[in-house]
Amino acid sequence: MPILDDASSDKFVEPDDVPRPVVTFGATFVSKGFELEPHAHRKAQLMMSMRGVLTCEAAGGLWIVPPRCALWVPANVVHGIKVSGTLEGYSAFVDAALATPLPAACCAIPVSPLLRELVIRSASFEACYPEGGLESHLATLLIDEIAAAPIDTMQHVPMPEDARLRKVATALMDHPADRGTLETWAKHAGLSERTMARLVVRETGMSFGRWRQQIQIMYALQWLAGGMSIQQVAIDLGYESAGSFVTMFRKALGNSPGRYMAERAAGQP
């Protein structure tokens, strides 16, 4: 696996130019963080993080991809990527013609041990690997494993198009512990409380409270995957105690934070 910095990113091969149904790249990026401007591929893309966290905005939503998780982006979907610090990750690009059994929309998926090893192994192949041999069989198995993976909805937050709500979304993500009321945030956006509530539902499909909670869950998953303690996550999200945070987490995801993260690490749905 190559170790790259920002200056060597031009060594990347354009996957759409490689005449193979599956093309996988892996790299460790050592940097202070970087961003890829919104772009699209003719091939679908599976982004898998092994170390570090990447953020992707696509199709009206924001996804956080913590270690041992992956994000599926269908072909021709415009997406922008942001990485904070060092990242060890892989991207598998799948020919759109072969992606029929695969998800039709952007989604996060937990990485099973088999899927992880298939992605890592396929990244060791030459871009134009021989067709009809081991490499082709592994590529087919990789597609089947992606298709069989459960969808994880908790790492996704709908992002509004309305500029006033985008301002609120940015503030909520910059200060996830802020406990301001709907009235407070409406004033921040220059809206009445009623208009704010109506716009949030229209643009995100959620109430304001649920939308804010989803942002907090997204950050909680990111921080827990990075090794932060439950106590510290609760503090950083503005909860009075770890117990109240655990109660919210269990109601939203059906499991305690510890068990939830252990199951994701094992690749369970």
Image (spheres, rainbow, N blue to C red):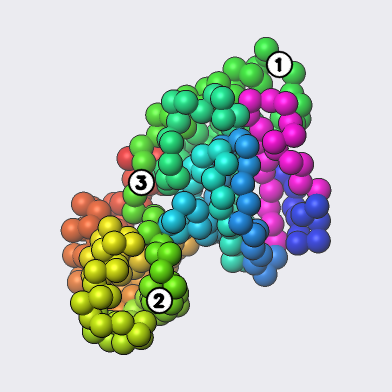
Residue designated by label 1? 131
Q: Vertical placement of 249 versus 127: above or below?
A: below
Q: What residue type is disc 1 on?
A: Glu
Measured as percent of width and height from the top left, residue 23 is found at: 66, 32
Q: Name the residue rendered at 32%, 60% in the picture.
A: 204
User: How far apart are the alpha carbons under marks 2 and 1?
Assistant: 52 Å
Q: Circle 1: is it few (<14), some (14-19), or many (20+) Cα within 10 Å?
A: few
Question: In terms of secondary structure, where does tag 3 sit?
Answer: loop
Res 101 seen here:
yes
The residue mark sitting in front, 3 or 2, is 2
* Mark 2 element type: helix
Query: Which dot marks residue 152?
Result: 3
- Which amino acid lies under the numbered mark 2 shown in the image of this protein? Arg
The N terminus lies in which quarter of the figure?
Answer: top right
Q: Is residue 66 left or right of residue 126?
A: left
Q: Which residue is at 63% across, 37% downward?
A: 42
- Tell me which label, 1 or 3, sits earlier in the chain: 1
- The magenta stretch spans which residues? 11-30
Along the line of sight, the residue nearer the viewer: 220 or 164: 164
Choose top left, top right, bottom left or bottom right for residue 105: top left
Q: Is residue 59 left or right of residue 26?
A: left
The answer to whether residue 143 is above or below residue 13 is: above
In this rendered view, identify the residue nearer to me: 204 or 229: 204
State yes or no: residue 10 in magenta.
no
Q: Earlier in the sequence, mark 3 or mark 2?
A: 3
- Give the residue at mark 2: 164
Question: Is residue 269 found left or right of 25 in the rendered image?
Answer: left
Q: Counting other residues with Cα less than 10 Å from the Cα at mark 2, is it few (<14), some (14-19), or many (20 or more)?
A: some
User: Mark 3: few, some, or many residues within 10 Å (few <14, many ≥20)?
Assistant: some
- Does the magenta-highlighted stretch encompass residue 12? yes
User: Quarter of the image holding residue 210?
Assistant: bottom left
Q: Could you tell me how far apart the alpha carbons at marks 1 and 3 are, in whole angstroms? A: 33 Å
